[in-house]
């Protein structure tokens, strides 16, 4: 589990972080609310530990903002699962083309058969390029809290999706596991970036 801490007092921040890491979780500490807010716009966490009276953006203000954003995202996801025809129809990213109304996808013009769950999972990743998505976040957005899928089940779905859509450097994308967190879809821009990435993997 990824836990973000907002605590202005460095000693308290250290103690809280030690406790969380001792329990086997990943701790992401912040000394002010603004830096935490910026970080959370690029990555997801599973728990917040907030200092109510931190300088600048207070813990209370941050919590209100996070609740508002999370609520909106959950509503959008639920509406999209129930009424896909009401969402934006076409999403094109590199060689990938998603049709939300038909729940279909093509790669370089070739159709790929995906289940409803696989399609939702794919669109979640391609709508959050570069962001770390925790397993709990993926669970909530793709399956909803009505299903309690295991970590192994989520990993299996991600693995099959990577193969089905050929999410590889040749298509300028990479679906990367993030240790103790979840997954992140990376966009490898241009042929030079792809070649550099492939050379990096060859020497690793």
Image (cartoon, grey):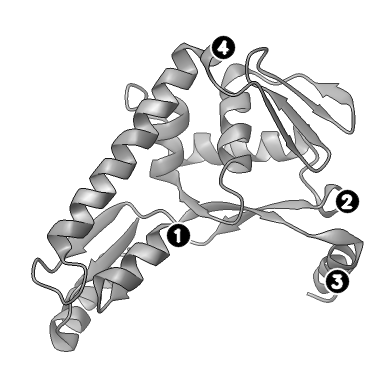
- Tell me which label, 4 or 3, sits earlier in the chain: 4
Q: Which residue is mark 1?
A: 180
* Residue 29 image point, x, y percent: 30, 74
Residue at horizontal 35 percent and vertical 27 percent from the top: 75
Is disc 1 placed on a helix, strand or loop? loop
* Mark nearer the N terminus (2 vs 1): 2
* Side of 144 where 160 appears, left or right: right
Q: What separation in Å lies between label 4 and label 2 (alpha carbons)?
A: 32 Å
Spatial separation of the CA atoms under disc 4 and disc 3:
40 Å
Q: Nearer the viewer, mark 2 or mark 1?
A: 2
Residue at mark 1 to residue at mark 3: CA–CA distance: 26 Å
Whole-angstrom CA distance, mark 2 to mark 1, is 27 Å
**Residue that badge 3 annotates:** 196
Circle on res. 170: 2
Residue at (16%, 63%) from the top-left corner? 59
| Cα gap from disc 2 to disc 3, whole angstroms | 12 Å
């Amino acid at each position: 589990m990824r836990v973000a801490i907002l605590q202005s007092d460095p000693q308290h921040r250290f103690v809280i972080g030690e406790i969380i890491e001792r329990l086997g979780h990943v701790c992401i500490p912040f000394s002010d609310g603004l830096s935490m807010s910026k970080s959370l716009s690029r990555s997801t966490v599973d728990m917040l530990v907030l200092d109510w009276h931190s300088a600048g953006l207070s813990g209370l203000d941050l919590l209100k903002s996070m609740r508002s954003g999370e609520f909106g995202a959950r509503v959008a996801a639920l509406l999209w699962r129930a009424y896909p025809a009401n969402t934006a129809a076409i999403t094109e990213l590199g060689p990938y083309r998603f049709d939300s109304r038909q729940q279909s996808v093509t790669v370089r013009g070739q159709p790929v058969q995906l289940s409803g769950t696989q399609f939702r999972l794919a669109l979640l990743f391609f709508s959050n390029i570069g962001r770390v998505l925790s397993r709990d976040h993926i669970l909530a957005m793709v399956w909803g809290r009505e299903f309690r899928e295991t970590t192994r089940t989520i990993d299996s779905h991600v693995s099959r999706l990577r193969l089905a859509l050929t999410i590889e450097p040749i298509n300028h994308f990479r679906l990367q596991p993030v240790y103790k967190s979840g997954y992140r879809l990376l966009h490898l821009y241009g042929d030079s970036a792809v070649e550099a990435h492939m050379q990096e993997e060859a020497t690793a």
